[in-house]
Image (cartoon, rainbow, N blue to C red):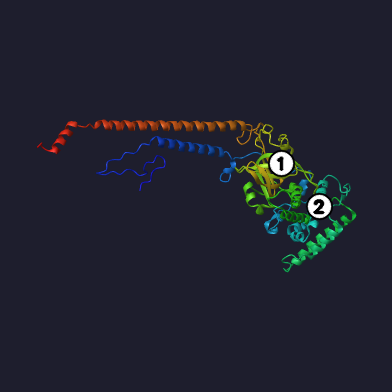
Amino acid sequence: MRIPSQFNDSSLYRPRRGEKNAKKRTSVPGAADSRRRLIRLGVVLLLVIVVMREARRPGLYQTFFDAPEETWVEIEPATTPALALAEQVDASSDAPANRPANRPATRSARVASPPSAAATSLAATWDAAPRWVDAMELPLQRAWIQSLIQLQSVGTQSVGTQSVDDRKPVEWVGLSVEQLDASAEQLMAQSPPGSDAPGSDATVGDSNVEVLAGLQTLRACAASGGCASGSWNQISPWASPLLDALETAAFQRVNDGTFWTSADSDAFYLGLARADQLAADQGVTTGTLPLLQQPEVYRGQTVRLVGRLQLAEKKTAQTNRVAVESYWKLWIIPADGGIRPTILMTRQLPKTIADCLTSDGSWDRASHPANPDGQIAAVGRFIKRLPYRSSIGADLAPVVIGRLVGAKGVATTTDGQAAKNADGGPDADADHVAGITGILFAVLAGIALAGWLMYRSALDAKRTRNLRQQAGDDVKLDLVALTDHDSEKQGPPS
């Protein structure tokens, strides 16, 4: 069995040589073979061009190789300077061993002076908040969200700006006296697993005593209609884990794959209100497809987005319990080589980013030569997949609620001048022109190579034709000899 070559239909085996078999001549491809070869070369050339264009995407090889260093400018949370005091978080409270499985990896903000050892220990070990929230009805959970966010926001803004005597009382919202009493009863009725272990009753009892004391303080605030602005400092050791549990329960009520519904409002606005508390180094970097394919796994989890800002839209918020008046809807194309967008909902848009937007919300390449493509980094919590209309029809886009943490900037040299870099600096336009020139050169080189191969094929065909003609001229017929031979066969005449 002879396997023909797919390139010129000749045999893949070498011709055999023997006493009775003369050396076989290889066949010369004809015109049809030359056309097929030219088509294959053209397809290969197009494949090379596609590979060259895709090779400039860093996301394709960053997984396997060290990507070139890039200059990124960190974006601070767009809040008051007192937020720095609010991020005094104990790292042990985020450890997987101390966090229930259904709670997202978040960092709880604590405002005030540095927490005491007892407060830190309570926040790290008190895990009754998820079970406490599960026992609450939905109206009671929403009342707790409204009250705690109000106390936290006022406490954060007042720290470091006014003395204790000058701070005005906070108007009480949310929880009523009856709801606080019901919450206290539910907390005392909780019997966490493992309470039969030696010493566990005392630990749970001490935690509940501190929480019940805080509930009495809040009950007095609800009865009088006002509360001291520093009240959050007293209740933050157990109020921060309670907010985490309330946020987890809100994310569990989200309807995935649909437009925004009333069941999504708690997680949406609570995520916006707490977005500034997310640290820039939280979460794992991900793209669009993992969020689309595994929404149940990522819902409520902290993720990091790195990509190109495609469009920014400012939206007016509806009436909500956390005093969010407006927010921004950012369409981001992740830097993983894909074209499917991810939506980032953020409460604030930094001025450095807003100044680079056009009137229609797209990125202005000329206004920021150091970042012509609008490369940004963000961190947030994934909430759901949202339908939208794309160029191919109805589609889904993952939605992340968080904040911007960085943008691609300009590296400076020792003399203070802007450094020239190939990944988005002052010479970005020149690099674009150089890329186009390289593609054109590759196309011309491919055409020249194809023409040279066709010329060689024509020369081979002409040489073979001449050889056949010369072989035919050497063979001459002797007509006289043939006539005599025929006469001998017929015999003598009779």
The answer to which of marks 1 and 2 sits earlier in the sequence is: 1
Q: Quadrant of residue 335?
A: top right
Residue at the (13%, 37%) spot, across then down: 488
In the picture, the disc for residue 168 is: none
How far apart are the alpha carbons under marks 1 and 2?
Answer: 28 Å
| Farthest right residue in view | 224
Residue drawn at the location 51% of the way across and 37% of the way down: 46
Name the residue carrying label 2. 146
Q: Which residue is mark 1?
A: 75
Determine whether 127 is above or below 430 in the image. Answer: below
Q: Is residue 37 above or below residue 387?
A: above
Q: Position of residue 291 (x, y in %)?
A: 65, 49
Quarter of the image where one finds residue 339: top right
Q: Amino acid at mark 1?
A: Ile
Is residue 116 visible in the rendered image? The answer is no
Residue 53 in percent (x, y) is at 56, 37
